[in-house]
Image (tube, grey):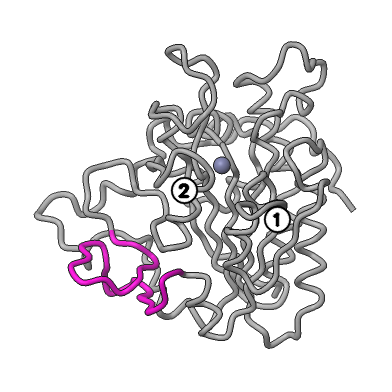
Amino acid sequence: MPQPDPGPVPPRAAPPPGAAGAPVAHGAAHAPDMNEMDMNEVDMNEVVGRDDLLLLTLDTLRYDVAAELAAAGRLPHLTAHLPGGTWEKRHAPGNFTYASHQAMFAGFLPTPAAPGPHPRLFAARFAGSETTADGTFVFETPDLVSALAARGYRTVCIGGVGFFNKQGALGGVLPGYFQESHWEPEFSVASPTSFEAQVARAEQTVAELPTEQRLFLFLNASALHQPNWFHLPGATRGAGDDRRTHAAALEYVDRHVGRLFAAMSSRRRCFAIVCSDHGTAYGDDGYTGHRLGHDSVWTVPYGHFFLEPPA
Ligand SMILES: [Zn+2]
């Protein structure tokens, strides 16, 4: 069942604006040594094989809107898990869905938005890689999804935007990395209840798995992607999307994300990555949309954290 709307949320004691990128400043006082640098103290070689894994891409989410809502206490379910209650500011590995997800599935998650090098959580074995550290899970396959399958994970894709709709050859490329993939019109950008439907599918996937079966679940949330005006009460199709409707769509996702986190941690600890694949422009400097090189597109919110199972 969908969670009820929690209603107005009082402002929380949030770190000051601009603190979102603070974690990447660790260890900057001397020449960067990859293994001393902050990876939020996660050794992915311990995580992989032990924990379930969630990659949740909030498609098209802008960093500035995400950071503003977090600071205003309007994302209570997401900020309850984000380190410090804030999003980390990162740079997207691509400026539209296909490019960005191809990169992420190869181990190139969004990069911290500060001079690097920055160690990666996952990396294909690659001679000369300067972002592979002790805590990096290094794989021999060309992509992370097949690498996790080789380690015994059930790999499941719950699609959202058109590049996951399995309609036509191109729409099958990204879902094709996974052992199991799901897409329904109700998951799509045109559905006002897309995220609830996607989360229900995730709950079903988890319920159907044998208890000992490790799971890597990827979910591409389509709610932020245009059109999103229908998430803001009183907005109209004619007026279209803007930063306010974008924000309303993110609040909609936040209202239901707790169900996804609960399902993913229902069997064992889960390591979760929540990020955007790229942002989008709403008339910024004259630009509209994405697949273009503007800061509103390249700058994305990111967070990773553990979801602990019920005691
Ligand atoms: Zn996208």
The quadrant of the picture occupied by the C terminus is bottom right
Asked whether mark 2 lies closer than 8 Å to ligand 1, one says yes
Residue in the foreground of this view, choosing between 104 and 254? 104
Q: List the residue tagged with mark 2.
A: 100
x and y percentages locating residue 135 in the rendered image: 33, 72
Q: Main secondary structure of the magenta part?
A: loop
Determine the image quadrant of residue 43: bottom left
Q: Within the displayed image, which quadrant is ligand 1 positioned in?
A: top right
Residue at image coords 76%, 53%: 198
Q: Is 120 left, or right, of 225 in this rendering?
A: left
- The verdict on residue 91 being magenta is no
Report the magenta residues as a range: 119-143
Callout 1 secondary element: loop
Task: Give the total number of marks visible in the rendering.
Answer: 2
Asked whether mark 1 lies closer than 8 Å to ligand 1, one says no
x and y percentages locating residue 209 in the rendered image: 76, 80
Callout 2 secondary element: helix
Residue in the foreground of this view, choosing between 100 and 302? 100
Instruction: Please identify the residue farthest to the front as the structure is shown.
Output: 169
Q: CA distance from mark 1 to mark 2?
A: 18 Å
Residue contact between numbered discs 1 and 2, judged by CB atoms under 8 Å? no
Q: Is 39 left, or right, of 81 in this rendering?
A: left
**Label 2 crowd (10 A; few <14 / some 14-19 / many >=20):** many
